[in-house]
Image (spheres, rainbow, N blue to C red):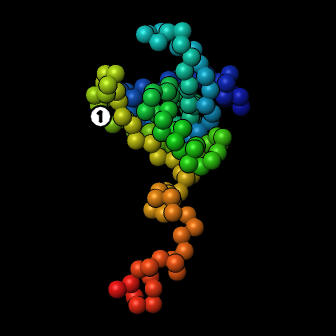
């Protein structure tokens, strides 16, 4: 195989036939859709190495996949995923949305950003427990 993933032969991952994807991240790139209702449109494609043969496969973006990958990068404060990072994408059930049916996905990242704490979610950074009235010397009673 070539070391340049952009010019290496690859196949599209088929959720119905291939099931869950458990692969190692290669790159995110743009590609033009050749067939179907989106023909001619540019979409994101995520490339992974999978299996014992290290096969190179492509996952075309969906709104759900794109939003989960975008949220993960934002949480990390990073511009890209780690080369070779293990990522699992599991198709879930179809759901009904305002624009019609869509497939949900569960995504697991090997180097996932830490989950925010309650203080971060509530935007209470810098709270000084000693200043809080319920923590005074009377035991907060």
Where residue 23 sits in the image (x, y, percent)? Answer: 52, 40
Where residue 8 sits in the image (x, y, percent)? Answer: 65, 24
98 versus 67 height, above or below: above
Considering every residue shown, the one lying at the far bottom of the view is 138
Q: At 57% from the left edge and 67% from the top edge, which residue is drawn?
A: 126
Q: Dot 1 lies on which element?
A: strand
Out of 122 and 51, give the one closest to the viewer: 122
Q: At 55% from the left edge and 53% from the top edge, which residue is drawn?
A: 113
Where residue 47 sits in the image (x, y, percent)? Answer: 57, 31
Out of 72 and 87, give the one closest to the viewer: 72
Query: Which quarter shows the N terminus?
Result: top right
**Can residue 130 be seen in this snapshot?**
yes
Considering every residue shown, the one lying at the far right of the view is 3
Seen in the image, is 115 located left or right of residue 90?
Answer: right
The number of numbered discs placed on residues in the rendered structure image is: 1
**Mark 1 = which residue?**
93
Q: At 42% from the left edge and 25% from the top edge, which residue is drawn?
A: 14
Where residue 40 sits in the image (x, y, percent)? Answer: 54, 9
């Amino acid at each position: 195989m070539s070391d340049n993933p952009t010019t290496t032969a690859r196949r599209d991952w088929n959720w119905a036939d291939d099931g869950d994807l458990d692969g190692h991240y290669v790159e995110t790139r743009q590609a033009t859709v050749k067939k179907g209702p989106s023909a001619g449109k540019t979409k994101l494609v995520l490339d992974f190495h999978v299996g014992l043969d290290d096969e190179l496969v492509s996952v075309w973006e969906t709104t759900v996949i794109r939003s989960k990958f975008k949220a993960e990068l934002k949480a990390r404060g990073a511009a890209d995923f780690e080369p070779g990072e293990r990522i699992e994408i599991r198709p879930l059930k179809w759901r009904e949305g305002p624009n019609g049916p869509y497939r949900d996905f569960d995504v697991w990242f090997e180097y996932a950003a830490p989950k925010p704490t309650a203080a971060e979610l509530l935007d209470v950074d810098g709270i000084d427990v000693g200043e809080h009235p319920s923590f005074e010397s009377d035991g907060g009673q």
